[in-house]
Image (spheres, rainbow, N blue to C red):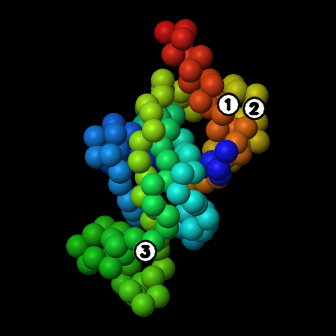
Amino acid sequence: MASCWLFKSEPDVFSYDDLARKGREGWDGVRNYQARNFMRAMKVGDQAIFYHSQATPPGVAGVCKVAKAAEPDPTQFDPKSKYYDPASKPADPRWDWVTVAPVRKLSFVSLDELRAVPELRECRLLAKGNRLSVMPLTEHEFRAIVAFSEQAARRG
């Protein structure tokens, strides 16, 4: 399996259903160097968990994949964008995005439910103070999240 990732988005801003409707979308607005560097490491075909943050409750909504590798995020150059960065120049862009595409919707798994999954004990998502919107997952963590969601769906 390729590398695995997790993308967080607020569902009222951009939800998994929005991604499914659009078919593919640039993951814009990342303004954290560590998260940007994670995106720069992504390869086409890498799979990711799509996580709804700032929701009640927050949790896993679906699986997506990297459809296009990192490239400059155009919102950094647009003065009308809330993600505009006047210090970033087209000749030396500071911020990147990757293009993601939906794979499949998952049965929703809340953050509290994820905390009870033994395979996720060391997962960055569950670490105190973790605010990154993009982060790596191990293949083991990715599979555990998907399996837990599938079990939840069967339980009904």
Q: Is residue 119 left or right of residue 45?
A: right
**Location of the N terminus (image quadrant):** top right
Q: Circle 1 is placed at which residue position? A: 144
SS at circle 3: strand
What's the amino acid at mark 2?
Glu
Q: Earlier in the sequence, mark 3 or mark 2?
A: 3
Q: Earlier in the sequence, mark 1 or mark 2?
A: 2
Q: Is residue 1 left or right of residue 44?
A: right
Label 3 crowd bin: few (<14), some (14–19), many (20+), radius 10 Å: some
Q: Circle 3 is placed at which residue position? A: 72
Q: Give the answer, above or below, for where 43 lies relative to 143.
A: below
Q: Is label 1 or label 2 in front?
A: 1
Q: Circle 2 is placed at which residue position? A: 119
Q: Is label 3 or label 2 in front?
A: 3
**Does residue 31 show up?**
no
SS at circle 2: helix
Q: Residue at x 76, y 28 (%)?
A: 118
**Image coords of residue 99 (percent x, y):** 42, 58
Please tell me which residue lies in front, 15 or 57.
15
SS at circle 1: helix
- The answer to the question of whether label 3 and label 2 lie on touching residues, with beta carbons closer than 8 A, is no
Cα–Cα span, label 3 and label 1? 32 Å
